[in-house]
Amino acid sequence: MISKNSKIYIAGHRGMVGSAIWRALEAKGYTNLIGKTSKELDLRNQQAVQNFFKNEKPEVVIDAAARVGGILANNDYPYQFLMENMQIQNNLIDSAFHAGINKFIFLGSSCIYPKLAPQPLKEEYLLTGPLEPTNEWYAVAKITGVKACEAIRKQFGRDYISLMPTNLYGPFDNFDLKTSHVLPAMIRKFHEASQFPVNSAQSAVTLWGSGNPMREFLFVEDLAEAVVFALENEFKDNLYNVGTGEDLTIRELAELIQKIVGHKGEIIWDSSKPDGTPRKLMDVSKMTDAGWKAKTSLEDGIKKTYQWFLENQQTFKQVKI
């Protein structure tokens, strides 16, 4: 049984997702949380991870560690996105298994589903068609993690489950324009352009693609609540989508962020750049049936994220654009 003093290891506790999970667990009274920075523990190093489990003896593992990035980063570093993510998750899953840990929560991404799968995306669509080429390296790695947890669950009866969140955003997001996802990149672009006179060339914001693809976004603190829910309950299946069940076009997202930031300049759509998957909406009925539902509206979530950006922008001012 999980108790408030159970030793819970959060891999990737300094990232956007891991730190949100840490805060959510602390808020609920969990007192025995452990985390290691990448300098303290290289999750790509199998022996180091095995030694960590032997010494620390956690009772629960939450895997929020990954090498992540947007279309550009996935395209430029395919080998690292495939190999490093497999190394990280394989070391964690296998070490947890051999350490006798019964509860493991693996976090993936909606990109594990086929590019042209029917919408909304159901869990059973996994491995039914080709992946989106712009992020298939990351997706293949995450699929192997899902299957490893499923295999342990099937063969040994352990409570290893996989949660697949939709596109995440929130405090501690990545605002580096070379490696960030669409929503934080837009926040930064609109904010920086809003510092120039409306009629100047610098006030215009250029965005990739046509603006027509549809996307779903989940506030990271809602995902953290879903992880806590999964920790405190036993699920009958191994794979669950986590999202809002609602989407909008990238164009609509841009206009919403523009309004929140207060940008008055022009938006230019560069249709020579790739759009990615046409639509990616999650079917979240399994998670809803289990008893959990997202509660933060997109507008409220973006407002909170922009406020965090304003309070912390000095930490990423030096990034070259």
Image (tube, rainbow, N blue to C red):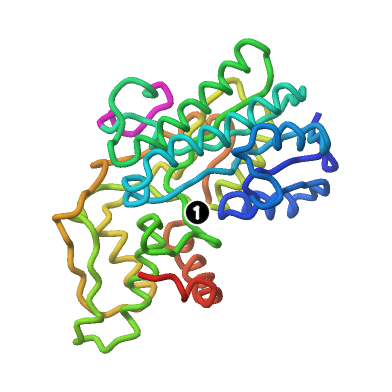
Q: Give the class, few, some or many, for how many residues have Cα within 10 Å of label 1's Cα (few <14, many ≥20).
A: many
Q: Position of residue 21 (x, y in %)?
A: 64, 49
Q: Position of residue 73 (x, y in %)?
A: 37, 50
Q: Residue at x 35, y 67 (%)?
A: 257
* Residue 178 within the segment the image draws in magenta: no
- Relative to 130, does residue 298 appear above or below in the rendering? below
Left or right: 12 with respect to 298?
A: right
Front residue (pair 29, 186): 186
Front residue (pair 153, 246): 153
Extreme residue toward the left, this view: 272
Rendering quarter of residue 258: bottom left
Please name the residue that numbered disc 1 is placed on: 219
* Residue 117 within the segment the image draws in magenta: yes
Amino acid type of the residue that numbered disc 1 sits on in the rendered structure: Phe
Q: Position of residue 162 (x, y in %)?
A: 55, 30
Front residue (pair 77, 252): 77
Rendering quarter of residue 94: top right
Image quarter where the N terminus lies is: top right
Q: Residue at x 31, y 45 (%)?
A: 75
* Count of marks placed on residues: 1
Q: Residue at x 75, y 50 (%)?
A: 28
Rendering quarter of residue 230: top right
Q: Residue at x 55, y 37 (%)?
A: 107
Magenta portion: prevailing SS class: loop
- Relative to 311, does residue 210 appear above or below in the rendering? above
Front residue (pair 197, 67): 67
Q: For mark 1, give the secondary structure.
A: strand
**What range of the chain is rendered magenta?**
116-124
